[in-house]
Amino acid sequence: MDILFAQIQADLRSNDALRQSGALLQALQQSAAGRDISVIAKSAVEEIVAAPASAVCKKLAFDLIRSTRLTSDLWDTVCTGIRNDFHFPDPDVTAAGVSILAAIPSYRLGNLITDCSKEISNCFDSTSDNLRFSITETLGCILSRDDLVTLCENNVNLLDKVSNWWTRIGQNMLDKSDSVSKVAFESVGRLFQEFDSKRMSRLAGDKLVDSENSLAIRSNWVSSMVDIVWKKRSALMARSLLLPVESFRATVFPVVFSVKAIASGAVEIIRSLSKSSATVNGSVVVDSNAEKLIGVSDVVTHLAPFLASSLDPALIYEVGINMLYLADVPGGKPEWASQSIIAILTLWDRQEFASARESIVRAVVTNLHLLDLHMQVSLFKRLLLMVRNLRAESDRMHALACICRTALCVDLFAKESVRRGQKPLAGTDIASLFEDARVKDDLNSVTSKSLFREELVASLVESCFQLSLPLPEQKNSGTESRVIGALAYGTGYGALNWTEPALEVVEVCRPCLKWDCDGRTYAIDCYLKLLVRLCYIYDTRGGVKRVKDGASQDQILNETRLQNLQRELVNGLREVNTPRVLARVIWAISEHIDLEGLDPLLADDPNDPLNIIVSHIHKVLFNLDSTAETTNRIQDVQAVLLSAQRLGSRHPRAGQLLTKELEEFRTNGLADSVSKHQCRLILQRIKYASAHQDSRWAVVSEARGDYPFSHHKLTVQFYEAAAAQDRKLEGLVHKAIVELWRPDPSELTLLLTKGIDSPLLKVPPTAITLTGSSDPCYIEAYHLADSNDGKITLHLKVLNLTELEMNRVDIRVGLSGALYYMDGSPQAVRQLRNLVSQDPVLCSVTVGVTHFERCALWVQVLYYPLYGSGVVGDYEGDYTEENPQVIRQKRSLRPELGEPVILRCLPYKIPLTELLLPHRISPVEFFRLWPSLPAIVEYTGTYTYEGSGFKATAAQQYGASPFLNGLKSLSSKPFHIVCSHIIRTVAGFQLCYAAKTWHGGFLGMMIFGASEVSRNVDLGDETTTMMCKFVVRASDASITKEIGSDLQGWLDDLTDGGVDYMPEDEVKVAAAERLRISIERIALLKAAQPRAKTPKSDDEEEDEDKNEDDEDKKKKKKEKKDGDEDEKTKGPSTLSKLTAEEAEHRALQAAVLQEWHMLCKDRSTEVK
């Protein structure tokens, strides 16, 4: 291999272009094979890039550079070579040099394009098509990057140049060369696409701080390009038709985006962001809607023929998507959307689009509402089958959410149109939309291999619940406003109009109660929750209301439908296949069935609804199935016992029947002790209710419309595979529904509404000084983290503190822990030249994070005091100047570096908390998950706080508690506060936090605190000590291991140095000391009392967390406050004749009165 590399280097040193190109091809081959070619890259830079060479060799050399890593010195050489290439007579060589600009590191790019700005501008005027193509393509990639926007923000001259270059790129869309025109369209399209879709904080790899100015700069470029395209739209459309058909695709999006921005008014928003008035820079002002609509119509007319005549599927897709984008502008026509959707759906069966089916369905369902009702209905069943075949869960859920919302829209819209006197359209009701044979078979079968039917039922029901909430307000026109408008039209903003489609949903999905889903119940729970809500709203307990009671015809019809549905459900109880579902259906029916409306003459009929319900309660209670124990039978028994209690309390005949069943169950061996006690209690309540039938409040059993069996309300849940699948399905459905119905405002919207207060405009964190006071270079640093990409960027500011100019300073950054450089290099080097005294220079490095671990960046400064003082190797003798070897050697001569002075800096440590993200979780979920977390670490911390007298430990009505001040910095850390319990009278608390690591591991933390008054009293103020017990549990042992390896460091990260770690040995010593003092004081109390009848040997062990004080009265009061366990073992007090309960009651009364007195006193002082 060494021989091969030596041969390649020898060929590179030759002046033969053929040998050089062959050597470069060989080097690229070795690079593709994974071999280290850095030696060859050095030769290529020095012999090809920095020297005159052919265009082919230059391009190959630049390809070689892209495939390897270069040192800072070699990048210097590359930049010098590019500068020379701009003046090279052959435009192809210049074009090759221009192409490498996109690969130049961002920390060198600013200086390079500033120095070569005149040459870059001249490239646009070149007669060479190749050079114009290269400059348009390269600048199109570079100019929209965040790093360049930041450079423009700090350099007004560069901003003017870049703005002019964008104008030139826009003009190149009409270039005579097809290739230049196409790449100009692509560049403008890239600018629009990145502005439209990017997260405002990131683009070019480095995480940068967005400011108002950088956003204004980018918006200014976008608005100017929109104006250019709108002005020249006719010429651009004509030019695009002259391009080869395979290049036409690139011309579609820039024209469509610009016309849509003008027609929808979005350009005004962009201009307001760019802080430029409409008349500045020749901005287009379109006065009439007619002109906007004509512009849109022209573009649609221009694009429509390609949908029908094109043979290129990719072009059909591109044109179809963009026409859909135009279809929802004000004044848009349904035909525009229908043409596009039909054309896109023809791609479904094409083999090359098999992997893009998700994109096809997403595009269609998102824009389904743009079609007329007839078209929506005809497409509906086909779309359901398409969605069923999607593989990706997230796409399937999004499509289902869109389809369910569309179904509700169609149903509501059609019904409201009929109410307003229009002709009814067949097939618009929910039942008709979902009557497809395959869907029906799936809903009616007991078992199924796919989850699709569960997803469908859950999505439909959750969509109904979303419809019951107030519709979100829409201020701007667009896709969402049409949906909101249709829903508002259908519901008429009536409070109960949503219940009509919900009733149809309940009827359509009724077969789900027969399903056996291997223990999964989420979809069935959703269904029952909606059924219970509807029964509560229409008060089915009271029977069908009459016209004379004030009921409308619609209400009477709906209540009749619900009553009929309830009877069908009762008769269908025998078809329910699982005890879990049977118990919950019994509860849902018995809670809301009209018992008073039952015929008393049919009391002995086995088909009487009440008899059927009681017989199925018996079936669940006496379930002898062998799988009953493995499927958590206790939960089913609890559910039917709850139903029995509420049903038996409502009706005397039901009470008699259920009393018999419960008595039998109590005496049976299947009942455990808890169930027996519960039966006894229920029997007593039924007996009391039957004895007090005239009293409405005998047993409070009013319906609440609540469904108590959703997993959020079950305090105990067994860890089953089916339950985990339910939680996963619930998460997917909820996410899709909420994203569709209540989408988070876009970052652009937040910036417009909140302006400078927007959280997206980040303030750089506080910088940390890394150098010593006497160092010639001052360095401070701060970091920014991007959890989405798993990257951390360290920003350094270097300042020359000497009075001399430093010719060269190298900044080396090494890594420790879980950090790595993207290019695989062990360290990063930033070479800084000509540092003027007191002039700050900025540089940055970006690293990736592999896992949750302590990590640090180690900065080293290399200062070269002798740099530039001499030249190595002065060639003397009889060598002729014409000798090419001598010329090459002289060209490669460099100033002497000399010995560097190495300044070692403090390591920049990344806080462990930086690698966490807040994780939203409900308290029930948190406490259910907590015992299952396998890894645990516990430790104790202390901090002191100061208060005045009693206020230090008593409740404060206003402001934060003084005893939480050591943990106040936790609010700014990436933790979600699950819940907090604060016992103010004894200055104690429990706080629960949840977080996830960047890589998905779960971390839960509980903090328990108790205050104690110390013996050190300073100037009349009490200095109090808070002892905190931290318990951290995690899903992975590596997380707790990392935290436990340096507990003080972890506490510093959490509390910004506010809490000190206290080793367990010290905790035990302090507890023993407090116990000794307590024993001595109790002994003194006993000695002071002549008759001490009750010995107190065990009480002291429970006094560890009490506060000490020299006054016996205060100690007595504190002991009474501290807990209930002391009272259980204590006898009568030795200081008075009061019992322990009376003494505690009086002490608490005194504490409250004293606190109230202090607060009133403070308030009067503040008022004065």
Image (cartoon, rainbow, N blue to C red):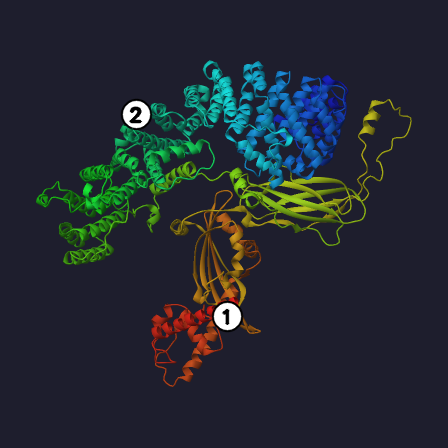
Q: Residue at x 55, y 29 (%)?
A: 193
In the image, farthest residue toward the bottom:
1090
Could one spot residue 1101 in this view of the protein? no
Q: Nearer the viewer, residue 550 or 1078?
A: 550
- Where on the picture, by quarter, is residue 331? top left
- Where on the picture, by quarter, is residue 885? top right
Q: Nearer the viewer, residue 792 or 478?
A: 478
**Across the whole image, how many numbered discs are drawn on residues?**
2
Q: Secondary structure at mark 1?
A: strand
Q: Residues within 10 Å of mark 2 (few under 14, many from 20)?
A: some
Badge 1 is on which residue?
1013
Please name which of the two marks, 2 or 1, marks the residue nearer to the observer. Answer: 2
Q: Going from the N terminus, do you reach mark 2 or mark 1 first?
A: 2
In-image side of 489 versus 431 (left or right): right
Residue type for callout 2: Leu
In the image, farthest residue toward the front:
288
Against 470, is 44 above or below? above
Q: Residues within 10 Å of mark 1 (few under 14, many from 20)?
A: some
Badge 2 is on which residue?
425
Q: Nearer the viewer, residue 627 or 373?
A: 373
Residue 784: horizontal and vertical position, in percent?
A: 59, 44
In-image side of 619 versus 429 (left or right): left
- Where on the picture, by quarter, is residue 408? top left
Residue 874: horizontal and vertical position, in percent?
A: 87, 33
Residue 835: horizontal and vertical position, in percent?
A: 76, 43
Q: Disc 2 vs disc 1: Cβ atoms closer than 8 Å?
A: no
Residue type for callout 1: Val
Q: Residue at x 53, y 52 (%)?
A: 972
In whole angstroms, how far apart are the C-alphas of marks 2 and 1?
A: 78 Å
Q: Residue at x 59, y 23 (%)?
A: 231
Against 1084, is 1128 above or below? above
Against 898, is 382 above or below? above
